[in-house]
Amino acid sequence: MRAPIIVERHVAVAPAVVYSYLTESSKWARWQGVEATVEAKKGGVFAVTMPTGGRAQGEFIELEPDRRVVFSWGWVGHDGLPPGSSTVEIDLLPAAGGTLIRLTHRGLPPEELGLHTAGWNRYLPRLGSAAEGNRPEPDTLTPPNV
């Protein structure tokens, strides 16, 4: 079994605030992509359109309010990582002065590890910044070659 990607970020807000940025379409789009469709319920759609038009897509697997969000992940039109073919878990752990966000991405093919590690290392700080009330610069990251 391949090792997962694990990225962590401490933010100075309560888990409930971060959770809202994982369960509301307009808030998700503030930190990742240019448009997001988030149906925050088990089996609900998760989709993010990136700046160049690439679309990450999956569905929600588990939601524990203010604690945990799990969704499947992949890219529309990308045979090596199609929608729903990997899993992203985001745990919101109460920590001194705020929340520790721990993102774990499982099930990625080896050739996708570098790109997704770089991506999550870019996006988790953007999530934290947005949750803390800042407005990250518009997203300009180029998605994988799909």
Image (tube, grey):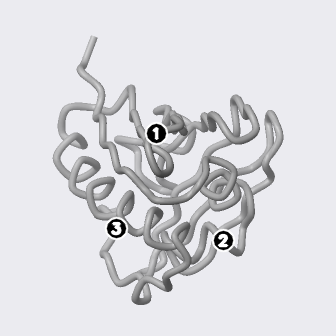
- Between marks 3 and 2 in the image, the one whose residue lies nearer the viewer: 2
Q: Quadrant of the C terminus?
A: bottom left
Of callouts 1 and 2, the N-terminal one? 2
- Residue occupied by mark 3: 143
Residues under numbered marks 3 and 2 in contact, where contact means CB atoms less than 8 Å apart: no
Residue 1 location (% of width, % of height)? 28, 11
- Residue occupied by mark 2: 27
Of callouts 3 and 2, the N-terminal one? 2
Q: CA distance from mark 3 to mark 2?
A: 20 Å
Q: Which residue is most to the top? A: 1
- Residue occupied by mark 1: 95
Which residue: 40% across, 88% down?
137
Q: Amino acid at mark 2?
A: Lys
Of callouts 3 and 1, the N-terminal one? 1
Based on the displayed image, in which of its 4 quarters is residue 106 positioned?
Answer: top left
Residue 99 location (% of width, % of height)? 49, 46
Crowd tier of the residue under label 1, counting other residues whose Cα lies within 10 Å: few below 14, some 14–19, many 20 or above? some
Which residue: 39% across, 35% down?
105
Q: CA distance from mark 1 to mark 2?
A: 23 Å
Residue toward you, 141 or 110? 141
Which residue: 50% across, 50% down?
98
Circle 1 — which element? Answer: strand
Which residue: 70% across, 29% down?
62
Looking at the image, residue 129 lies above or below residue 120: below
Q: Amino acid at mark 1?
A: Ala
The label shown at residue 71 is: none
Crowd tier of the residue under label 3, counting other residues whose Cα lies within 10 Å: few below 14, some 14–19, many 20 or above? some
Image position of 40 (left or right of 61): right
- Between marks 1 and 2 in the image, the one whose residue lies nearer the viewer: 1
